[in-house]
Image: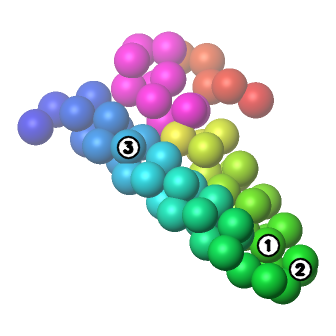
Amino acid sequence: MSESDDLHGRARQMREKAKDLRDAAEHTSDPGERKRLQDKARRLSSESEQVSGMASGDIYPME
């Protein structure tokens, strides 16, 4: 398995985790916990985009 495949797999896992966090946020009744989960999901989504960009050969990570 190449480094690119590893990065694509990592990005996919991060996107799946972000989706799980968004789903959990929708089902919690605690507003503070909902915000924490949503924030974490956003960070993971952003990181997964950066990892995906690196896997595709984009040498400039998104900010």
**Residue type pointed to by label 1:** Arg
Identify the magenta region: 49-58
| Residue 43 image offset from top left, x and y in percent | 70, 51
| Residue 40 image offset from top left, x and y in percent | 70, 62
Furthest residue to the bottom? 30
Q: Nearer the viewer, residue 46 or 34?
A: 34
**Residue type pointed to by label 3:** Arg
Q: Secondary structure at mark 1?
A: helix
Give the residue at mark 3.
Answer: 12
Q: Residues within 10 Å of mark 2 (few under 14, many from 20)?
A: few
Q: Specify the label residue 34 is tagged with.
A: 1
In contact (CB < 8 Å): disc 2 and disc 1: yes
> Is 55 a magenta residue?
yes
Q: Residues within 10 Å of mark 1 (few under 14, many from 20)?
A: some
Image vertical order of residue 52 relative to residue 25, above or below: above
In the picture, the quarter occupied by the N terminus is top left
Q: Secondary structure at mark 3?
A: helix
Q: CA distance from mark 2 to mark 1?
A: 5 Å
Left or right, 57 with respect to 45, comes to left
> Is 25 a magenta residue?
no
Q: Specify the label residue 32 is tagged with.
A: 2
Assign the magenta stretch its main secondary structure: helix
Which label lies toward us, 2 or 3? 2
